[in-house]
Image (cartoon, rainbow, N blue to C red):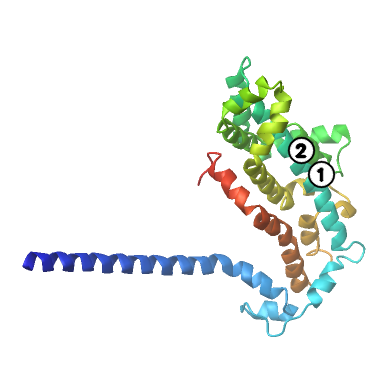
Amino acid sequence: MGAENKDRKRKKNRHKSRTVGQLLCYVFLTALAVVMVYPLLWMIGSSFKENNEIITSLSIFPKQIRLSAFVEGWKGNGRYTYLTYFVNTFLLVVPTVFFTVFSSMLVAYGFARFHFPLKKLCFALVISTLLLPEQTLMVPRYLLFNRLGWLDSYKPVIVPAVFATYPFFIYMMIQFIRGLPRELDESARIDGCGSFGIFAGIIVPLSKPAIFSVTLFQFVWRWNDFFNPLIYINSVSKYPVSLALRMSLDVADTVHWDQLMAMSLLTMLPPVLLYIFAQKYFIEGIATSGLKG
């Protein structure tokens, strides 16, 4: 009986220690989440505050909810409204995303399903470009696009996407396609289907999770891209929202932080909405392409 009581006490002590440990872990994670989310919540609250209240108060909640920052901020610099900047951003991002998905899928299909001379060497060269810093490519790209007459346009961003210049997405697609059964290809060939027929009728429909993952990654990266538009685009009428937000800090002596926060909040909505609607496929694509964190 004494031994049984000791065992029960040990089990209770272990259970208590585990409970305390889990509780401390939850408290720590909650505190960390609050610290991480606080800047975002502060930005959302600041978009409804007055300009003076933003500077003098650290509170998330405004004293009085105001929508004038959205109305005035949408007017932009007076010559171009944020409607122009949002349209420009979509004209830049949507074709880039489309061509990135298509070209990456096509190249990945070739590497994953075909055997050709120097295949391993070509694959190594493609993946090795991941090691190149963007700074080393900046000057050659600018000189090339300048000679082609592509400056002050969206071509320096869109055209490279046509030629599968994003090795990260190629590798991601290759990993996903390799997980698809080859028996499906063989069955399609027996039915008289060619390589492009297999690609369009089997590989692409079954690769929806990977396609959504690439779409989301590229959409967010190009939507938030500040560096490339800053280098290649000179006309204000062609600015995307990333440059428009930065320009709003320079057009006046007094910075209207309430308007800047309001426009920043609107700028966040398209990527967030895209993630919400594509969340299921995005998680599945990440989990099945060998890119688990």
Can you see residue 165? no
Amino acid type, label 1: Tyr
Between residue 24 and residue 56, name the one nearer to us: 24
Looking at the image, is mark 1 or mark 2 earlier in the sequence? Answer: 2
Between residue 196 and residue 244, name the one nearer to us: 196
Q: Residue at x 69, y 74 (%)?
A: 46
Amino acid type, label 2: Phe
Residue 80, by quadrant, is: bottom right
Q: Residues within 10 Å of mark 2 (few under 14, many from 20)?
A: some
Q: Which mark is residue 232?
A: 1
Q: Which residue is mark 2?
A: 99
Disc 2 on helix, strand or loop? Answer: helix
Residue 23, by quadrant, is: bottom left
Disc 1 on helix, strand or loop? Answer: helix
Can you see residue 97? yes
In the rendered view, tell whether residue 32 sits above or below residue 211. below
Residue most extreme to the front = 191
Residue most extreme to the bottom = 63
Rendered location of residue 39, percent (x, y): 61, 68
Rendered location of residue 236, percent (x, y): 88, 54
Horizontal placement of 6 versus 109: left or right?
left
